[in-house]
Amino acid sequence: MNREGRGATAPTAGTAAQAPATFTGNRGLDLEEGLIFEIGRSEVTGVDIPEPPDFRARLGGLERKVAPDLPGLSEPEAMRHYVRLSRMNYGIDSGLFPLGSCTMKHNPRLNEKMARLAGFADIHPLQPVSTVQGALAVMTELSRYLLELTGMAAVALPPKAGAHGELCGMMAIKAAHLAADQGHRHVVVVPESAHGTNPATAASIGYEVRAIPARADGTVDVEAVKAALSPEVAALMLTNPNTCGLFEPDVVKIAAAVHEAGAYFYADGANFNAILGKVRIGDLGVDAMHINLHKTFSTPHGGGGPGAGPVVLSPALAPFAPVPCVVEHGGALTLVEDEGAAGAEAALGRMSAFHGQMGMFVRALAWMLSHGADGMRQASEDAVLSANYVRASLNDLMSVPFPDRPAMHEALFDDTWLAGTGISTLDVAKALIDEGYHPMTVYFPLVVHGAMLIEPTESESKASLDLFIATLRDLALAAKAGDTARFLGAPYYAPRRRLDETRAARAPVLRWLKSAPLGAAAE
Ligand SMILES: *Cc1c(COP(=O)(O)O)cnc(C)c1O
């Protein structure tokens, strides 16, 4: 590992400039940690098992001749290794996490307690259904709540993330077209402002993606949708509120135009947090929408998992929902496992091995029950209020691309305010790391130049929002005053400085090799 990037060499950043290098590489109690392959020793193990007295291999000469060369650590060393790594992670439990489009909200510990109950945590998907009736009841109750909140006809619980839910919904649309002899429809219309997963999902199941531009005010033009529709179009995919944080005012007209053209309306529900308890998307004419339980309903996410992306479906698409699904039969709950079976005659098949993410179902239902109908409505109102507070507190220093419309749950800025400073959106994000914040989402949505997308969520107090706003104001004033060093060299205080992000994405080194030359890793 290359340790030269450690941050004791800031040219201008206050104390960092004077900070001496340390012998250990540690900085105070901020501990440096190598890979387990670098610190482990092959002769050490955490367990001490005596050699069996009279050992004869029965592998017919196939037994290993040399030790496997796995790194070993004593038990305290192993414990420290993983705890040190965990301390390098920034999460919603460490501080405000303004990442737009991700709804990084507080995960109440009550949910964790519920998910850890033995009746949920210690069951196995292959257990007889007679022994997991309570778990199936939770899935049924969660479904009932999701249908009530969306005004839709059916919900499929198996998808394991938002993108997986998109795949499920789009596969249901494809199955419905095939069943209606409309298999020739091969185009999916997607606004330019869409999340990348939308066109990727459509393309991955063989659809041709047709993009439509956004209006100058950041919303989708119903006339542009109409112009893109034809007998070749299978579906429109639209996010509402959209990725610019704006509610699509023409959504009902857009839905009508899509249906008139014989296509289906897929809604990306990742931004449901803004309208939860306020709008039932079934009333808007939506045919399918995924819900990121791990965003709207607070279940922990980040770092690749776990997620849960149930999909709600309109009456037209409900028959095509995947298996397994929970049905009530003779007073007991059971899982319909096979497509074609009674209750799943037209099912599109299976999205995952089992029924979905049980722990996330429990957490989401616990969140719903502890909030109640009024609490959920309040949560989305507070999320929208927080975003507008952030926007209104910064819009004299930072530029807002669509100032005429109120924001929904996220505040969007562009980089016009940085013009002439020599500082970019990326530099601002890096400087925010030095201030102890995870950066906001940057350069997304793509339709806004140098975008900075901030989603504070409802779980931040006013005091915590005020400190975040004050920090951004301080950075904005420094940028305008020409303090470029604070930005261009940032982060100064992070365990690692700037990485070659392009190289890390294009040529990732994912496997540690003993002989890897120094500098071969992304850093
Ligand atoms: C997060 C998100 C997705 C994808 O959800 P994952 O759970 O990350 O797969 C899709 N669309 C939008 C707008 C999102 O914010």
Image (cartoon, rainbow, N blue to C red):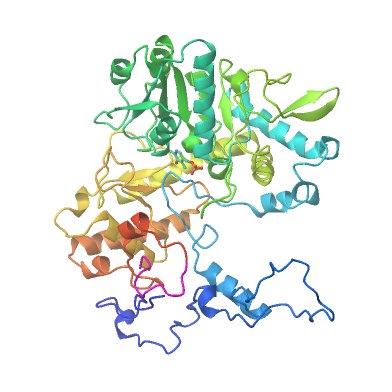
- Confirm whether residue 279 shows in the render: no
- Confirm whether residue 28 shows in the render: yes
Image quadrant where residue 222 sits: top left
Q: How many marks?
A: 0
Which percent across, then down, holds residue 22? Answer: 41, 88
Q: Is residue 294 magenta?
A: no
Left or right, 505 with respect to 72, comes to: left
Instruction: Indicate the quadrant containing the N terminus: top left, top right, bottom left or bottom right.
Output: bottom left
Left or right, 213 with respect to 465, comes to: left
**508 w.r.t. 74: above or below:** above
Left or right, 72 with respect to 472, comes to: right
Q: Nearer the viewer, residue 143 or 174?
A: 174
Image quadrant where residue 230 sits: top left
Instruction: Indicate the quadrant containing the C terminus: top left, top right, bottom left or bottom right.
Output: bottom left
Image quadrant where residue 231 sits: top left
Residue that protrudes farthest toward the front in the picture: 60
Which percent across, then down, holds residue 191? Answer: 34, 29
Which percent across, then down, holds residue 441? Answer: 37, 50
* Residue shown at the point (35%, 36%) measured from the top left: 406
Residue that protrudes farthest toward the bottom in the picture: 23
**103 w.r.t. 310: above or below:** below
- Helix, strand or loop for the magenta stretch, by majority: loop
* Residue shown at the point (50%, 32%) measured from the top left: 167
Q: Nearer the viewer, residue 477 or 225?
A: 225
Identify the magenta region: 512-523
